Image (tube, rainbow, N blue to C red):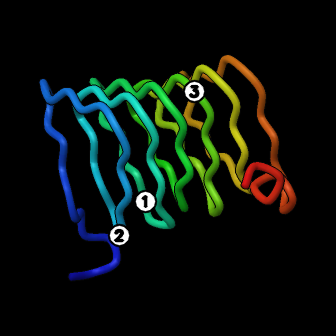
Amino acid sequence: MSKDEINAFLGSGTRYQGQLNFQGAVRIDGTFTGEITSDGTLIVGTDAIIDGTLNVGQLVLSGTVNGEVTATRKIVIHKTGIINGTIRTPALIMEDGARIEGEVHMGADSTATAQ
């Protein structure tokens, strides 16, 4: 299994509540409420809604996240992506149209303070 291959997929219409821990990459296109922890990549699809706390290596966002997000490597927000809450990451990439409502903490020390 390659590093970029998706290990799990929560499809559109799926509702999940609880805790998610994974390695590699996971894609969510449904609704998730709870805590997500991984040093891998979380891919959030256009129609996805996540409410909770994210501690991941990398976030690739096209949907909506409400809560606190910590990414140890980077966050990529596509034009349909929305984050309502606090972000901690050393690198942030945003396309035109992407939105953040909340606080952004960047730099090498930003992810260490959230742990």
Please, what secondary structure does the residue beneath circle 2 have? loop
Q: Earlier in the sequence, mark 1 or mark 3?
A: 1
- Local crowd at mark 3 within 10 Å, few (<14), some, or many (≥20)? some
Q: Position of residue 101 (x, y in %)?
A: 67, 17
The quadrant where residue 3 appears: bottom left
Q: Quadrant of the N terminus?
A: bottom left
- Quarter holding the C terminus? bottom right
Q: CA distance from mark 2 to mark 1?
A: 6 Å
Q: Identify the amino acid type marked 3.
A: Gly
Q: Position of residue 61 (x, y in %)?
A: 44, 39
Residue at 44% in and 47% down? 36
Q: Residue at x 20, y 57 (%)?
A: 8
Q: Earlier in the sequence, mark 2 or mark 3?
A: 2
- Neighbour tally class for label 2: few under 14, some 14-19, many 20 plus, Cα within 10 Å: some
- State whether residue 26 is above or below residue 77: below
**Are dots 2 and 1 in contact, CB under 8 Å?**
yes
What residue is pinned by disc 2?
Answer: 24
**Mark 1 lies on residue:** 41
Disc nearest the viewer among 2 and 3:
3
Asked which secondary structure carries label 3, the reply is strand
| Residue extending furthest toward the bottom | 1
Give, as a three-letter code, the residue at label 1: Thr
Q: Which residue is mark 3?
A: 67
Q: Which quadrant of the structure image shows residue 7?
A: bottom left
State the CA–CA distance, disc 2 to disc 3: 22 Å
